[in-house]
Image (tube, rainbow, N blue to C red):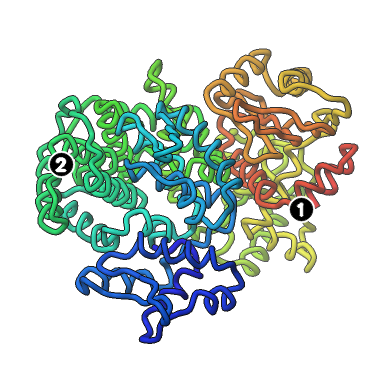
Amino acid sequence: MLSQPRLKEILQLLLQPVGQNTTDLSQRFGVTVRTIRSDIQALNRLMPGASIALKRGKGYELTITDPERFNPWRQQALSRGWTLTLDSMEERQRYMLSVLLIQDNWQDPDDLADMIYVSRNTSQSYLRSIRQICSRYGLSFESRSQKGIRITGPEIRRRECLLQEVLDMDRNMKNYVTEFSPLEKQLFRHTDLSALSAGLYTSLQEHRLVCSDYALKNLVLHTAMMLERIRTGGILPELEPGGFPPEIMQATEDICETLEKKEKLAIPASERDSLSLHISLNTRLGCAPESEDLRTAVTQMLEHIRAIWRFDLRNDQVLIKDLYNHLFSIFKARYSHQNRTNPLLNTIRSSFPLAYDISLDAVSHVFQPMQFSEDEIGYISLHIGAAVERCYSGQMKPVKTYLVCGSGMATSRMLEARLKSYFQSKLEILACLSYQQYLSLDEHKLLEADFLITTVPLPERGLPFVEVDFSLTRENAETVARMLTPAQNETEGATRFFQENLFVRFRDPVSKEQVLDELCTRLIQNGISSPELRESVRRREEISHTNLNDIFAIPHPMTPEASRTKAAVAILDHPISWNDSVDTVQIIFLLAFCKGEQKSIERLYDFLLEIVQSIPLQQEILKSQTFEEFFSRCLK
């Protein structure tokens, strides 16, 4: 509402019965008299139902002409959340751009500079940037010496620019969905955003339309922008018929009827169609219409995930329902020729990389050659990731183990009894095995365990193990106890994913292709991956980039294909560009997954997330000149 805290203080002073002298105000705030005059002009532009005038011998006085309009505005303007700080160049430029996009009429450059409290010269640099932004959206930036400045062009492009260049910048705020920012309140100051949000939510519920908090916020901002533009004369052209479901059409009519009464304006048919489109994109029916094709697609996705990734989610009815509804909403959006952006995409990719890769693989397999966007894959991966957590992780189940003992049945039974006495329901011993039985145990049976307890050294078979004495000393019991803690289990198990001949330090500048070539070659030469690895990695990179932040990347093939799960590591002295967004990386883990080793794959991804979430650990890894240094720093 008020673009600077000083405006709020001046308004509070003017609400008092005593007039305010220009000189006194300038000294009070430590600014020039000219700045105070600019502040008064800004307040007069913003205030409805009131004005400020300079009275001879008295100073500035506030006169209220319409209390019904002024009092609600004053209450909002003086509240804590309605002050724009405009502390950075980006904030000031965004605010100036928003004024030009909301208003159709000519704007005085000096007034624009006063609004954001910068000099005319400084504001000119902002306007040059705004001119460039306009060209990207097909808008015209007009400047006339006698008239001022304005932006013209297609209404739909104007609104797109306002959303993407001004409003979308607030999406990363923690409180984005719970409250409205000062900028949002300032832009849509003629609309009670909280009341609008509550009204939209109630209407959607009445028509069995379900939406997330993010989607509701999108709808609120779109609707508020629609109302503001209608007030200033900006109307969308007629759209092609959308063929929306009756629930959406009826919800739109009810919402528009309520808004017309409350806001005292008429909402044209084109704006109603646009609102229907946005409701369609941001909601789904509480029960989506039945489609045999979509049912089959969901079944095929889950069958593929079971066959390739060994996560059997086929009986998760929550996942089946959620996937069906979400796929329905995706195709509904495509029917309307609209793409739904995913504000959480970067967080999803960096925080749930395994779920993202499983989803990408399943969707590519079932819907080939149809390409889903990264935004759509991101949403699907949230459903897949939640199902994996429900079925395989985070449940208070006993940790499963095989007990391998080379001293005979009696010894193994004694050790089994002592383990049960120590750990009771926390540990489930699946079976007592001899060494030979362990060697001949079927791979699928072996992977039913989380780790192994053994009295003899064991060859590597993809599971971590703890070697103990048959008497189970106190030190042995403490080691087993650490394996029962998921975080410790993951750390203990991480060591087996790395080996010296899969580590390389590049001291000279190299390209992304050179790094991938070298790491793939090492995995192939060591018998871990097939010669098709490099091509599979290339296809995966074409679909979606694999860097998790500006330091760390985890390229990998499309599907599990290795003889065992490993990571080839490259550390670079010189950062390399990793994708079209000019992101650079210096740490690369090329992952090779073994089909069927879902527990190993989970542990490896969990370990990678520890690295992503720890900047100090990333810096330690970057210092590693040799495999020994990497091993000690990364896995200590």
Which kind of residue does numbered mark 1 sit on?
A: Pro
Report crowding for label 2: few under 14, some 14 to 19, many 20 or more residues within 10 A (C-alpha). Answer: many
**Which residue is situated farthest in the bottom direction here?**
17
Residue 123 relative to residue 480: left or right? left
Assess disc 1: are there few (<14), some (14-19) or many (≥20) residues with their C-alpha within 10 Å of its C-alpha.
Answer: few
Residue 365 is situated, as x and y percent measured from the top left of the image, at: 43, 21
Pick the quarter of the image with the N terminus.
Answer: bottom left
Q: Where is residue 46 in the image (x, y as percent from the top left)?
A: 35, 61
Q: What kind of element bears circle 2?
A: helix
Question: Would residue 440 appear left or right of 290 to someone viewing this image?
Answer: right
**315 sits to left or right of 402:** left
- CA gap between label 2 and label 1 equals 50 Å
- As displayed, is residue 86 above or below residue 156? below
Q: Closer to the N terminus: mark 2 or mark 1? A: 2
Mark 1 element type: helix
**Which residue occupies the foreground of this view, 552 or 106?**
106
Q: Against 315, is 535 above or below?
A: above
Count the marks: 2
Can the viewer see residue 306? no
Question: Which amino acid type corresponds to the residue marked 2 in the rendered image?
Answer: Ile
Q: Where is residue 128 in the image (x, y as percent from the top left)?
A: 55, 36
**Could you say which disc has been placed on residue 248 in the image?**
2
- Of 457 and 256, which appears nearest the observer? 256
Residue 496 visible, this orientation: yes
Residue at x-position 65% and y-position 59%: 416
Q: Residue at x 43, y 78 (%)?
A: 59
Residue 581 percent coordinates (x, y):
60, 30
The residue that label 1 is drawn on is 616
Q: In the picture, residue 294 is in which quadrant? A: top left
